[in-house]
Structures are given as C-alpha cells and as structure tokens.
Image (spheres, grey):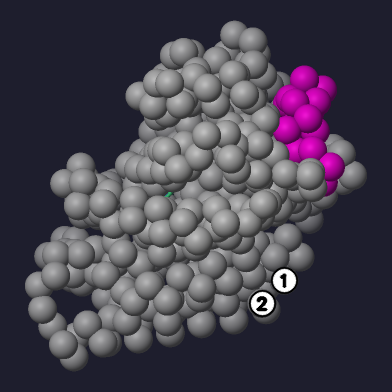
C-alpha cells in the first residue's frame, strides 16, 4: 500500500484565511516544501518554482479533464499554443482597446455619482466580463453569466464540491455551444476571436466545439484573475497617496506599477503539476505521480529572489517575476490582462482628482483566490 505522507499544514487554516500573503511568507521560511491533504506538495520558494517551470518533462501539466492549451505537455502543447497565440497579438489588442476603454468609461460614469462605491461588483467584474464579450463578439449581457460562473467555480473549488464543479462545466459547455451554433446559422467574417477559434487548425484538424469550450473555460477563468487583480491594484492606489500622485503625474509608469503591485500582492494562489518520476526538492523526497502546487504569491515575495521583496518599488527590474508564470506555460492572455488593467487605471485616474479607501475596510477573498471580495472606494 502506498505510504501517505504526513501533512505539514492546512491551506485553509486560520492564518491563511486571515492573510494568505503573511501565512505563505511564514511557510516559505519555516517549511518551503510542505505537504497538505488539499494541495499535495506546495512549493513556496522562488528557485524551486522556477526549476519546476523549466522542466516540463519531470513536472507534467496534463490534467484529468480537457484543458487547451494548459493541460497539455510539450511537444503537443506547443502546437495548440502556437495555433491560439494570434488571439492576443498586438493587432488584436489595438482593435480591442477602444472598446475596452468605452466599457470602462461607461461604468465609471454610472458609478461615480455615489459617495462610496463597492468596486468589485460595480467595476472589476462587469468590466472584465464585458470586455471578454467584446473580444468574442458576443452580446454584452452575457457578462453576468460568466461572472456568476467564475464565482460559483471558486466556491465549488473551496468546498471541494465535485458535483457542483461538474454541473458548472456542463452549463458552461452549453452556453458556449449555443453561441457557436448561432454563429454558424448566420455566418459572416467579423474578424473577432470567435471567428478565429472556429477557424483554428491544429495538425490539419479544425478545433471541435468541445475543444473551443475548453479554451474558453481558460479565458473566462483568466478574466476572473484580471478582476481579482483590479481589486488589488485599486486598493493599493487608493491607500498609497505617493504612488497615486506618481501615476497621475506620469501615466507612463502605470504598466510597471501593475507588474510590481501584483508581484507584491498576487491575485493567483497556485497552479498544479504532477511529478513524472521521484524528485528531491530542498532535501525532501517527492515520489512519482504526486501533486505539486506552485505557490505564486510566496515565490514572488521571496527575499532570495528580490531585494526588499515586500517593498513596493515601481522602478524595480521585474524580469524574474512569477506573476505570469515562466517557460512553456507562461500566461497566454497576459497581453489582454495588461491592456485591461492599464485602461481601467488610466480611466479611473482621468475621471477623478483623488481616490481613497471608503469607510468600510477592504475584505480579502479566501483560497483559492487572493483578490478582494469587497473594496469600497471614495472618489473626488
Ligand atoms: C492578471 C491576470 C492574469 C494572471 C496573473 C495570470 C497568470 C497566469 C499564470 C501564472 C499562468 C501559468 C500557469 C502555469 O504555469 O500552470 C497562466 C497561464 C495561462 N493564462 Fe493567465 N493570467 C491572467 C489572465 C489571463 C487571461 C485574461 C487569459 C485569457 C483570456 C489567460 C490565459 C491563460 C492561458 C491560456 C494560460 C495557459 C498557457 C499555456 O498553458 O500555454 N490568463 N496565467
């Protein structure tokens, strides 16, 4: 019988639920390779995470369910990845930018009338999901479906509720397939991402509907991460007046500020891998076939990799950042995420003189997210 490793920690313990950053900082120093029932082997150090990312043969990303392209290993992974890259090229992003800016401006216009605004529900969620609808050329009112789907998926994952997860997967598939069906009944070259996905060919075979559903599951989840990131970015800008003034007087610093804030305060808790052979990390033996969790938030705050790692420094050289991952699976949607976050911050600063935290303190989301569940802001 396989020997069950002893658990070193519980990712849902009180410390983690209170403040994931602090809890993971502590784990990184005390127990950098830690086993838990929920996540398998969590890696907290930057060097260990980077080593895993650089060796996809030993650390497989193949998933139980179809996930394109992230649930594939090289060399098959590359074929799908390259076929999908065109959706995030600069031409596509330039075409999307005015639409994303209008979505942001319209939402700000409607929310700026109140004294205090809860920005997660009022801005981050609708902005990201409406922008996705624009990219796909789908009716804007579908944003609510995708928003709900992300929230319910996080809940199902927190509760390890596989029945709810399965139902969500089926609903999502139906929603996407209905859109594809409509597109087929009134075909026209619109040049949007739906056209592009329906015409994607890998190894001379066109993507089928189930494969497109799998690609889009990833994109919608990615937009959920953008929404979580926006809540974190807005909070830092509201509570750090010096940073806010710096960005107001020099908006060209916004992209660097985004990278640095998300390095110090990451939106994404972890991504998994599976060992394809026995390995030793920080002296601990991890057998073949075990689950590994790459703890992004902790790796990005590792003082061995970044000078004064927990201090926000917009001028920092962030070449070693793990915000987007590294290697074969580095975030494919990063150009879209960066565009959305820049546009949202630019519009917020343009339309206001001062952004401050509201009276009600920000509330953190809990595992498996690290965005905010509530962020009240005041605008002048
Ligand atoms: C601020 C927002 C985002 C962050 C911080 C983020 C972060 C990441 C990270 C860390 C990975 C690597 C995962 C791994 O190695 O297992 C990844 C992969 C990926 N992301 Fe993102 N992501 C964001 C937004 C998005 C968006 C908006 C999309 C698409 C619309 C997207 C699509 C993907 C895809 C398709 C992959 C898998 C790439 C592959 O396997 O080749 N992401 N992301």
Res 156 visible: yes
* Above or below, 200 relative to 59: below
Residue underneath mark 2: 164
* Above or below, 193 relative to 11: below
136 horizontally vs 28: left or right: left
Q: Position of residue 122 (x, y in %)?
A: 58, 60
The kind of secondary structure element at disc 1 is: loop
Residue underneath mark 1: 161
Please tell me how many numbered marks the rendered image carries: 2
Q: Nearer the viewer, residue 368 or 52?
A: 368
Q: Main secondary structure of the magenta part?
A: helix
Report the span colored magenta: 17-35
Q: Are marks 1 and 2 in contact (CB under 8 Å)?
A: yes
Residue at the extreme right = 14
Q: Position of residue 194 (x, y in %)?
A: 24, 69
Residue at the extreme top = 307
Q: Quadrant of the C terminus?
A: top right
Q: Residue at x 43, y 76 (%)?
A: 142
Q: Count residues near mark 2 (Cα–Cα under 10 Å), then give few for <14, some for 14-19, many for 20+.
A: some
Q: Residue at x 76, y 65 (%)?
A: 159
Q: For residue 19: magenta? A: yes
354 horizontally vs 137: left or right: right
Q: Nearer the viewer, residue 247 or 53?
A: 247
How far apart marks 1 and 2 lie (CA) works out to 6 Å
Q: Position of residue 353 (x, y in %)?
A: 52, 34
Q: Position of residue 321 (x, y in %)?
A: 49, 25
Q: For residue 36: magenta? A: no
Q: Residue at x 77, y 20 (%)?
A: 29
* Above or below, 24 relative to 67: above
């Amino acid at each position: 019988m396989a020997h069950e490793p002893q658990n070193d920690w519980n990712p849902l313990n009180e410390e983690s639920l209170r403040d994931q950053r602090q809890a993971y900082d502590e784990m990184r120093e005390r127990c950098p390779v830690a086993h838990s029932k929920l996540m398998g082997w969590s890696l907290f150090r930057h060097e260990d995470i980077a080593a895993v990312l650089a060796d996809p043969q030993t650390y497989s990303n193949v998933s139980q369910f179809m996930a394109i392209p992230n649930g594939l290993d090289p060399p098959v992974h590359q074929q799908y990845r390259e076929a999908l890259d065109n959706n995030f090229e600069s031409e596509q992003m330039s075409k999307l930018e005015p639409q994303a800016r209008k979505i942001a401006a319209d939402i700000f216009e409607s929310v700026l009338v109140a004294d205090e605004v809860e920005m997660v529900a009022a801005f981050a969620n609708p902005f990201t999901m409406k922008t996705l609808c624009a990219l796909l050329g789908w009716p804007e009112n579908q944003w609510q479906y995708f928003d709900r789907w992300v929230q319910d998926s996080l809940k199902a994952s927190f509760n390890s509720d596989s029945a709810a997860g399965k139902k969500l997967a089926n609903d999502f598939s139906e929603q996407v397939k209905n859109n594809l069906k409509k597109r087929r009944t009134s075909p026209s070259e619109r040049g949007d991402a739906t056209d592009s996905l329906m015409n994607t060919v890998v190894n001379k075979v066109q993507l089928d509907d189930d494969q497109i559903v799998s690609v889009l599951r990833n994109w919608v989840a990615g937009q959920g991460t953008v929404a979580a990131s926006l809540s974190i970015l807005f909070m830092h800008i509201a509570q750090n007046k010096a940073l806010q003034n710096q960005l107001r007087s020099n908006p060209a610093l916004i992209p660097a500020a985004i990278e640095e804030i998300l390095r110090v305060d990451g939106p994404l808790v972890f991504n998994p891998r599976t060992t394809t052979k026995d390995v030793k990390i920080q002296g601990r033996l991890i057998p073949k076939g075990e689950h590994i969790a790459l703890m992004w938030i902790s790796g990005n705050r590792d003082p061995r990799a970044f000078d004064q790692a927990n201090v926000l420094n917009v001028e920092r050289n962030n070449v070693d950042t793990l915000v987007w991952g590294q290697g074969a699976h580095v975030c494919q949607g990063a150009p879209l995420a960066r565009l959305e976050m820049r546009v949202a911050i630019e519009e917020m600063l343009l339309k206001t003189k001062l952004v401050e935290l509201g009276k009600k303190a920000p509330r953190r989301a809990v595992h498996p997210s690290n965005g905010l569940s509530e962020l009240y802001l005041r605008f002048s």
